[in-house]
Amino acid sequence: MDRSEPLSDGVLPAEGASPSAPLTDEECARLRQQIARSVARVCPRWLSAQAEDIVQIALIRVVDILRAREGNEPLSASYLSRVAYTTTVDEIRRLRRRREVPLEEGAEERHEGAGPEEARAGSEIGEGLRDCLGRLAEPRRLTVTLHLQGHTVPEAARLLGWTDKRVENLVYRGLADLRRCLASKGLTP
Amino acid sequence: MTLDERDGERLRQAFAGMAERAVPRDDCPRPDVLWAAVHGERPPDEVHRLVAHTSECGVCAEAWRLARDLRGTAAGPAVDPATSPGVAWWGSWGSLAAAAGVAALAFSAVWPSGPAVERAPAAPTLRALPADNQRLPRDRAVLRWTPGPPRSRYDIQVATVDLRILTRARGLDVPELALPAAALAALPRGARFVWQVEALLPDGTRITSPTFVAILE
C-alpha cells in the first residue's frame, strides 16, 4: 500500500488543544472505533473480509500523521473519514491490481439472482458502455458520467462549474447519444 | 418507477459493473484527490479531467462513487477533544523504554480484535516465551508464545515501537514465528519492537495476548 502519499494537506482544523497526557488505552480504543465506523461506511460489501485490515492500516496512518504534526489540534471526524476512504481505495486498487477479488464474487453482488449468462451480458454491456462513452463529445461525456455516478443536475453543475440548464441539456443529449450507440452494438441495458 | 427511470437505473448498474474487471492504471489520481474533487475542493478544470478519467477507468469510477456515498456523512462534528489524541503523547517519549511502553499501549488498540467474547475462567492466556523483553539474534529471530489447546490457530503481527508494521502472519498452527530477515533489515542493533498474538481456539473463542516487546541484537 502506498504510504508515501500526503494525507495531511491542510484539512485538519485547529479546534482547541487536545490532551497533553499520553494516550490512554481507552482513548486508543475510541480512536479505533471511530475509524472502524468510517471504514464500515465506505467499505464495499465485496471488500468486507478486509475491513479489519483496512481499519488497522488507517489507524496506523492516523498515528503516523499525529506523530509528524506539530501542535495539538484534534482530528476532525471528517478527516478520519477521509483517511478511512483513502485507505479503503488503496486496498481496492491493490486487490484489483492483483486480481485477488474473485470475479464471480463481484458478479454475484452486482447481478443478484442472475445466472452466468446474465453476468456475461452485463460484462458485454459494460464494455460497450465504456466504448460509447468514449465516443461522446467531452461536455456530454462528463455530464453523462456524473449522471451515471448518481449525481443530480445541480450537483454536477456545481462540480463542473456550469449552469444547471447547460448540464441538464448535456445530460439529455448525451444519454440519447449513448443509447443510440449502444443500440448500434445490439446492447440494451 | 417509470420506464425511463428503470432504463436509467440499468445504465447506472452497467456503468458500476465496469469496475468488476477493471485494473488500476498508471495515471489513476490519488484517492485523496478524488475525495477532494467529490467534496468540491478542486477547481472545475481539474474536476473535468478527473471525471473524464472515471468515464474510462472502472476502478476510479468505483472510488468516486464511494466518496460520493460518504459525502454528507463525513462532515460530522469534530471528534470530541476528550477522546481525540494529540501529538504531545508522542513527543513525551523520553526514552526508548518509555517509547516501547507507549507503543505497546497503542498497539493493543491497533490490533483488529473482534467483538468481546465471554470466556470461561479457565481460558488460557498467551505469554511470550521464554519471557517478555527478550533479546533476539537478528539471524535467528523467532518469536514464541504459550500454546492454546490443540488445533488452535494464531495470527501475529510485529511492528516497530512507532507502530510501523514489520510483518504479520495469519493462521499459524504452531505457536512461533521466525521473523524474515527482510522484515528486520531496517532496524538497527538494539532496536525494540512490539508484537501481539491472537489465538483462535477450537471452540471459536478468540484470545488476544498482551503486547510484548523484543530487542534486536
Image (tube, helix red, strand yellow):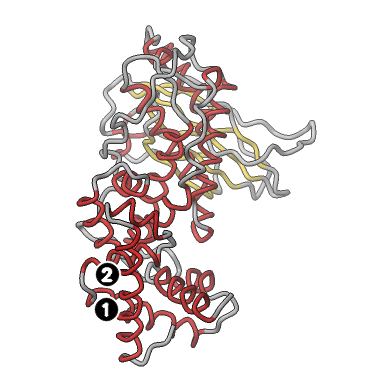
Name the kind of residue labelled 1 in the image: Asp
What x and y, as percent, mark residue A142? 28, 64
Q: Is residue B153 above or below residue B207?
A: below
**SS state under label 1:** helix
Quadrant (top left, top right, bottom left, bottom right) of the N terminus of chain B = bottom right
Of discs 2 and 1, which sits in the foreground?
2
**SS state under label 2:** helix
Q: Which of B186 and A83 is in front in this view?
A: A83
Name the kind of residue labelled 2 in the image: Arg
Quadrant (top left, top right, bottom left, bottom right) of the C terminus of chain B = top left
Q: In this view, does B42 lie above or below B132?
A: below
Chain letter of disc 1 in the image: A
Q: In this view, does B27 lie to the left or right of A15?
A: left
Residue at 50% in and 69% down: A105
Q: Nearer the viewer, residue B120 or B144?
A: B120
> Mark on residue A140?
2
Residue at 40% in and 67% down: A148
